[in-house]
Every structure is written in structure tokens, then in C-alpha cells.
């Protein structure tokens, strides 16, 4: 290969490398993989559907969002904290109060008759957590 | 004019060069097997990285010590080096655990150091020309280091990681049988080690560090992040050695400094391209690795040659070249491994949060979500390292619950995206090493 041809090949290789970087930037390479953190304080689309399972999920997920918003953590961090795997960074009583109040607010957002709404609100605000979980299991909600 | 070489001597030189390429390849040949070792030995990225680091550390330390202590007598170590390399390769193939494998890699590295440091004077004797020997020895080194990962990937896919070490036995055994004893005196360019040789060695160390810091994460990303099979990953990685060979055609007619500067720039650009991958696209990764390969092909052989003839002895030059090259590999690995482990941990946390969020919002009954969460957590505890293995609980339930197909695909995309970004700082670190090599390269004076 002549020196002139080799020089041209070298320049072509450098341009191809620079082009690759430009193409990747154009395809959004800079922001790729930056997983957006879900803001629990923002209003998200509710869990779709009717029936006991869908309503329970809608209330539960919205309640977790509102509780997480009060504590200043993500919904998943709160869930992991409730499962006892990691600390949420707040005293257990504060976490429990935030979750109960979040669930109560989520029940208010549902289109329920006043009696059911009052009963469910009292349940999530005051019922012992173990009892509420065993009730959910008996209803087949937790498998 | 060099004396004519007999065909027998040429054949023996060729056999020794294959063994030299195998020993150089050993720096990186295990890289494609690292994900399998990660699963087999239930270890961490730091733990498995020692399989590569231990080998390179011993080669670097021993080669530098031998070059300093023995000078031209180092040629006599070729055959003992081949014997040790052969025995250690056999033992590595039968290693029962990670600590055994790391220990045996130390022995293999010692053998490789003796072989690599001692082979150049023997080659010069066989070929009757020191400069020709340096050129072939440098080419064997580049080809071996660049081919290593692809070869390792093929062997891991077709057999398993142990086959990588078995494959090294035949070339070492044949070379042991055919390599002559070291000659008393060998034709060698003489001179004093000058600033040019030192600058070339410094640049060689930095470029080698950048190479390993490119290969190691690129392979782990493709197999563990994108879920490619080792054979497919080897196909992508093979862009690097192919480009390395192609670079030798360009490099020959051009000036040394210009070629070296362009090579280091190409290597850095290839690494930046790997850092900015916008999707799990093997074609883009292959393009980026080809740029890295061109950079390696334009720099490594030239730097080896530039560092060699100014040395006081061919043997000392070879030892130094092997030493600084592997020292660069070790520095690259040691800088890369904690960064990678940290960023992978952070990426894992992000994947867990985002994955859990998607599973929570998925249109499935609560009981199914609880069951899936348990199954996924068990997969993490069992150390499943690829997206396919991790998401197997979803795949196995797809027939009964078609909605899971979309969720699984979305989780696969999520894992690939988070891990691709998780490797970004590692690639940028490697690009920094390549750019840093420009400093000694630009300081090299014309001969």
C-alpha cells in the first residue's frame, strides 16, 4: 500500500470512528439507561379494572405512593422496607402512620358508597397490621 | 543483508511464535469465560477478575525482574518457561475452585513470563536477524492479545471454560519439543536505553491498560447485560482482531509518530463509542471494537519496535516490553474492577427498583405478583447472572399468563439499558488511558 493510500485510509478510519460517536449521540446514547425515578408524589394512572382484586391493587398501590411521598422515598423502597429487607430511613411508627394515612387517602379517591368508605378507612387507619394481612390472605389477595 | 534461513529453522520459529501468541493471548483469553466462571464459582466481579489480574501481575513482575537481573542470559529460560506454562495450563483445566484457579494462573503467568522474555533472542537466532525477529514477535503479541477473547468465547460456548486451558497445551508441547537451547550469542541491535524507548514503553503500558479495560467490560456487558451467548459475543469481539490485522496494512508506509498518535486517538474514540452505546446493538458494538482494534494494530507493534532497538540487549528489551505491557494490563484491570463492581451494584439497585415498579403496575392478580416476586428474588439469591436466567420464572409462566411476555420483554430491555449505562464510566476510564498514551507518543523524537 502506498503512503498516500495508507494516509487516506487512516483519515477514513478516524472519520468513521468520529461518525460512530456522532451517530450514537444522535440515537440518544448520552441519556440511554438513565432510568427515570418514579415520583410517588405525582398523580399516576390508577390500576385498571373493577372487582375486588383490581380495586384492592388500585387502593394499595396509590396508598403506597402517598405513603412514600410523605416519607420522601420511592414506592419500591417503602415496599422493601415494609417487607423488612431494608430500612426506609424513618422510625417504624412514622412509616406505619404514613402507610395507613396513604391508604386512607387512596380509599377516599375511590368511588365508594359512604358507609363502605368509612368502614374501610377505619380499617386501614386502626386495624392491627397482622390482622389486616391475614384478612387479605383469607380473601385470596396474597395467594 | 540477513543470512538465508533454513526451512527447518523457519518452521521452528513459527512454532515458537504460535506458543508466544498463545502466552500473549492468555492475558485476555479467559475474559469471555468470566461470566461462566462468575456463575460456576458463585463469586463476585472482583473475585473472578483475579483470574485475569493474577496472571498479568506475575508476568509483569517476573519479566521486569528477569530483564533487569539476567539481561541476555534470559534466552535460556525459554524451554523451562514452556514446560511450566504447559504444566500450569493442564492444571488450570482441572482447577476445582476459584482459589485453585487463581493460584494456578500465578504458575501459568510465571511460565509465560519466562517464555515471553526468553523467546525473542531464540527467535533472533533462528531467523538470523534481530529486527525481523522483533517484527514477528511484536505481531504475534498483538495478534495473540487481540484474538484471545474471541477464541476463548468459541471454546467456552462449544465446550466450557476449561477447554480454554486445554487448547493451550498442544502449541506449548510442540514448541517445547522443537525449540532449541538458547544460543550463547545472538544478533542484537545495540545502544543505550534512550528517552524514545522509555516513552514507547510508557505508551505501550497505557495502551495495553486501555485494551484490557475495553475487552473485560465489553464482554461482560454483552453476555451478562445483553444476554448474548459466548459464541455470539465472540463474533462481535472478533471485529477487534480483524481490525488489528487490517491496521498492519495501513501502518507500514506511514511515519511512526503519526501512526501512533492516530492509533491512540482511534482507540480512545472506539472506547468513547462503547461508553455511548444507545441500545443493545451488537453491530454498533462491533463497529466500536473495530475502531479499538485499528487503534491497537496501529500502536502496539510500533511501540514494541520503538522500545526495542534502543535497548542495550534484545533480551532485555523483550523482558521490558513484556513487563510494561502486562503492567499496563494490571493497572487497567485494577482501576477498572472496583469501578465496575460499584457501578454494577448501583445499576442492580436501579434495575431492582424499576423492575419492581413495573411488576407492581403490571395487569396481573396480586397473588401472581407475590409469587413472581418470590421467584425472582430466589433467582438473585442463586446468583443467576444473565437476564434470561433471571427472568426464567416469567418465561415459564407465559403459557398460562400471556401478559407476562410483554412484562418480561420490558424487564429485559430495562436490565440491558441499566447495565449498558453501568459500564459507561469503565469505558471512559479506558478511553482516558488511551488519550494519556498520546503524551509519551508525542514526546517521542524522530530516530
Image (tube, coloured by chain):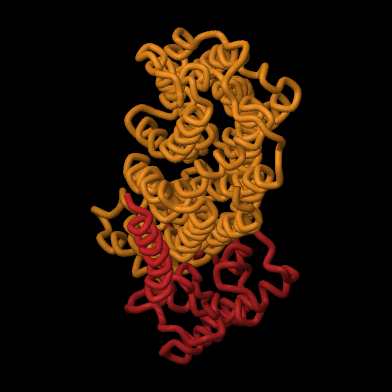
Q: Residue lying farthest bottom?
A: A114
- Relative to B436, residue A116 above or below: below
- Relative to B142, residue B259 above or below: below
- The answer to which of B53 and B176 lies nearer the viewer is B176
Q: Residue lying farthest front?
A: B1
Percent position (x, y) of residue B27? 54, 34
- Relative to B131, residue B223 above or below: below
Q: In this image, B60 relative to B31: left or right?
A: right
The number of numbered badges drawn on the structure is: 0
Task: Give the letter of the orange chain.
Answer: B
x 29%, y 60%: residue:
B405
Residue A140 appears in view: no
Q: In this image, B128 relative to A130: left or right?
A: left
Residue B35 appears in view: yes
Percent position (x, y) of residue B77? 62, 15
- The answer to which of B98 and B352 lies nearer the viewer is B98
x 51%, y 9%: residue:
B180
Q: Quadrant of the N terminus of chain B?
A: top left
x 62%, y 11%: residue:
B184
* Image quadrant where residue B173 sits: top left
Chain A tint as drawn: red
- The answer to which of B300 and A43 lies nearer the viewer is B300
Percent position (x, y) of residue B278? 41, 67
Percent position (x, y) of residue B411? 40, 61
Amino acid at each position: 500500500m502506498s503512503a498516500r493510500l495508507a494516509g487516506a485510509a487512516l483519515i477514513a478510519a478516524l472519520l468513521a470512528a468520529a461518525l460512530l460517536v456522532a451517530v450514537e449521540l444522535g440515537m440518544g446514547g448520552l441519556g440511554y439507561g438513565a432510568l427515570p425515578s418514579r415520583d410517588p408524589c405525582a398523580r399516576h394512572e390508577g390500576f385498571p379494572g373493577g372487582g375486588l382484586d383490581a380495586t384492592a391493587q388500585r387502593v394499595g398501590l396509590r396508598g403506597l405512593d402517598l405513603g412514600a411521598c410523605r416519607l420522601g422515598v420511592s414506592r419500591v423502597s417503602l415496599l422493601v422496607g415494609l417487607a423488612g429487607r431494608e430500612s426506609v430511613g424513618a422510625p417504624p411508627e412514622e412509616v406505619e402512620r404514613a402507610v395507613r394515612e396513604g391508604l386512607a387517602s387512596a380509599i377516599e379517591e375511590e368511588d365508594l358508597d359512604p358507609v363502605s368508605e368509612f368502614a374501610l378507612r377505619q380499617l386501614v387507619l386502626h386495624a392491627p397490621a397482622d390482622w389486616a394481612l391475614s384478612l387479605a390472605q383469607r380473601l385470596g389477595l396474597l395467594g | 543483508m540477513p543470512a538465508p534461513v533454513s526451512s527447518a529453522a523457519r518452521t521452528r520459529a513459527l512454532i515458537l511464535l504460535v506458543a508466544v501468541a498463545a502466552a500473549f493471548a492468555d492475558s485476555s483469553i479467559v475474559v469471555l469465560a468470566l461470566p461462566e466462571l462468575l456463575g460456576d464459582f458463585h463469586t463476585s466481579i472482583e473475585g473472578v477478575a483475579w483470574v485475569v489480574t493474577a496472571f498479568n501481575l506475575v508476568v509483569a513482575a517476573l519479566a521486569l525482574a528477569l530483564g533487569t537481573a539476567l539481561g541476555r542470559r534470559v534466552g535460556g529460560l525459554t524451554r523451562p518457561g514452556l514446560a511450566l506454562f504447559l504444566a500450569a495450563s493442564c492444571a488450570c483445566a482441572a482447577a476445582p475452585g476459584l482459589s485453585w484457579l487463581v493460584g494456578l494462573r500465578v504458575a501459568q503467568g510465571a511460565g509465560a513470563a519466562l517464555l515471553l522474555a526468553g523467546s525473542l533472542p531464540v527467535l533472533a537466532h533462528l531467523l538470523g536477524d534481530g529486527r525481523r525477529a522483533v517484527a514477528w514477535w511484536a505481531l504475534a503479541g498483538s495478534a495473540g492479545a487481540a484474538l484471545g477473547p474471541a477464541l476463548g468465547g468459541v471454546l467456552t460456548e462449544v465446550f466450557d471454560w476449561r477447554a480454554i486451558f486445554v487448547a493451550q497445551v498442544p502449541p506449548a508441547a510442540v514448541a517445547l519439543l522443537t525449540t532449541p537451547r538458547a544460543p550463547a550469542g545472538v544478533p542484537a541491535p545495540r545502544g543505550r536505553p534512550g528517552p524514545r524507548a522509555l516513552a514507547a514503553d510508557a505508551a505501550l503500558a497505557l495502551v495495553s491498560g486501555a485494551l484490557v479495560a475495553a475487552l473485560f467490560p465489553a464482554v461482560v456487558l454483552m453476555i451478562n447485560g445483553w444476554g448474548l451467548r459466548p459464541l455470539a459475543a465472540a463474533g462481535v469481539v472478533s471485529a477487534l482482531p480483524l481490525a488489528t490485522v487490517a491496521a498492519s496494512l495501513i501502518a507500514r508506509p506511514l511515519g511512526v509518530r503519526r501512526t501512533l498518535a492516530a492509533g491512540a486517538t482511534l482507540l480512545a474514540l472506539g472506547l468513547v463509542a462503547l461508553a455511548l452505546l444507545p441500545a443493545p446493538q451488537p453491530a454498533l458494538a462491533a463497529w466500536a471494537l473495530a475502531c479499538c482494534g485499528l487503534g491497537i494494530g496501529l500502536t502496539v507493534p510500533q511501540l514494541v519496535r520503538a522500545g526495542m532497538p534502543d535497548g542495550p540487549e534484545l533480551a532485555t528489551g523483550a523482558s521490558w516490553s513484556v513487563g510494561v505491557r502486562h503492567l499496563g494490563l494490571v493497572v487497567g484491570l485494577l482501576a477498572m474492577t472496583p469501578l465496575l463492581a460499584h457501578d454494577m451494584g448501583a445499576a442492580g439497585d436501579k434495575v431492582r427498583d424499576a423492575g419492581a415498579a413495573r411488576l407492581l403496575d403490571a395487569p396481573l392478580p396480586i397473588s401472581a405478583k407475590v409469587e413472581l416476586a418470590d421467584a425472582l428474588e430466589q433467582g438473585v439469591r442463586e446468583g443467576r447472572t444473565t437476564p434470561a436466567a433471571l427472568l426464567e420464572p416469567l418465561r415459564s409462566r407465559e403459557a398460562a399468563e400471556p401478559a407476562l411476555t410483554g412484562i418480561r420483554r420490558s424487564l429485559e430491555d430495562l436490565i440491558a439499558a441499566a447495565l449498558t449505562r453501568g459500564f459507561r464510566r469503565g469505558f471512559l476510564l479506558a478511553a482516558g488511558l488511551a488519550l494519556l498514551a498520546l503524551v509519551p507518543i508525542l514526546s517521542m523524537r524522530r530516530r
